[in-house]
Amino acid sequence: MITVENLTKSFQHNKSNVVALDGVSMEVPAGAVCGVVGPSGAGKSTLARCIALLEKPDSGAIRVDGTDLVALDGKALRAARRQIGVVPQGDSLLRQRTAAGNVALPLEAAGMAGPQRRSRVGELLDLVGLTDKASVYPDQLSGGQRQRIAVARALAAKPSVLLADEPTSALDPGTTDSVLTVLDRARSELGVTVLVVTHDMAVVRRIADDVAVLEQGRVVEHGKVLDLVAEPGSRIGETLLPETGQADLLKPSKNGHDVVAEVVLVGFAAVGALLPEASSRFGVELSILGGGLTRLGETPVAKFKVGLSGERAESALKWMVERDAHVRRAPVCVDGAAA
């Protein structure tokens, strides 16, 4: 588990004090993948570097499995750093070493014996799907393959935490997917807690359990992805879910519907059956006015704007809410004006 408490960090730039992190607090559960997103300059990479102990924060605490890393020094600090694997931004492989040689580098530094080292390198190359590239040099690999080797190298010392800074930057969609598959396997097969700094919301959509949104050095939204997308006004929800034409939601219905609402459905059962069952059970006509389906990780999620017509339209909406649908109602209209 990663716990960040009231973290602050500032830099001097052109004789001015620039606050990169301003009281950042967040928690990443053990074995989860957390995406850290936000605009350029929000403090994402600084946060990752502080957690990796590559930058020392001005104040605050960074706890990994209960140990405050900020309070450590000397031998204890070096031991803590070995528990954190880092995939830096950009191409970080050594050109004079083969793929296997790059993965072996931290194991050589730790003094691991040759047979054990070769066995561990083989395991990691298999994990990232590049066993056949063991003797190939970085310049002969694609960008995505180099990133997968960088992930393997970061996992070599069996860390409990993996930090990846923009691991899919400048990669095409197919290559991005291969890198994300490796990060997901690190979580699911090795139990590693993964923190991914990214500007690419496809990363959050594909592998993130949790997400933290940074703006101007502050966390403005944080929590489980599937919880946040259902919250009205959620920034993550607005970004990840299909558009429904929200501006029209607050206008009087011109289609003769008794009730107009925005509905978010999470999970196979809700997405597949809840709307038609509500229509049948309460004898109401239900029309889809906007929105669509998407998938977050392995979970289907739908966001629809719906119109309901019939005497029991309100009862149908209430029934859906009782079955965990997330509903935002349009205001009741009186004489053609929103009440």
Image (cartoon, grey):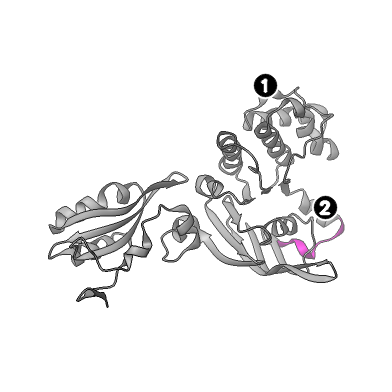
Picture disc at residue 78: 2
Whether 169 is drawn above or below 113: the answer is: below
Image quarter of the C terminus? bottom left
Identify the residue at horizontal 77%, vertical 26% (top origin).
Answer: 137
Q: What residue type is labelled 2?
A: Arg
Write the start and end of the magenta stretch as one range: 67-74
- Residue 187 is situated, as x and y percent measured from the top left of the image, at 59, 44
Whether 249 is drawn above or below 33: the answer is: below
Sequence-first disc among 1 and 2: 2
- Residue 124 is situated, as x and y percent measured from the top left of the image, at 68, 32
Whether 228 is drawn above or below 60: the answer is: above
Quarter occupied by residue 15: bottom right
Of residues 11 and 192, the one drawn nearer to the viewer in this rendering: 11
As helix, strand or loop, the secondary structure at mark 1 comes to helix
As helix, strand or loop, the secondary structure at mark 2 comes to helix
Q: Does 43 sit left or right of 242 as displayed?
A: right
- Residue 280 is situated, as x and y percent measured from the top left of the image, at 15, 53
Quarter occupied by residue 284: bottom left
| Magenta residue check for 82 | no
Q: What residue type is labelled 1?
A: Asp
Identify the residue at horizontal 67%, vertical 24% (top origin).
Answer: 131
Identify the residue at horizontal 20%, vertical 52% (top origin).
Answer: 277
- Residue 158 is situated, as x and y percent measured from the top left of the image, at 70, 42
How far is mark 1 from mark 2, CA to CA? 33 Å
Q: Does 75 sit left or right of 268 as displayed?
A: right
Of residues 287 and 73, the one drawn nearer to the viewer in this rendering: 287
Image quarter of the N terminus? bottom right
Residue under label 1, please give it.
132
Nearer the observer: mark 1 or 2; the answer is 1
Of residues 119 and 7, the one drawn nearer to the viewer in this rendering: 7
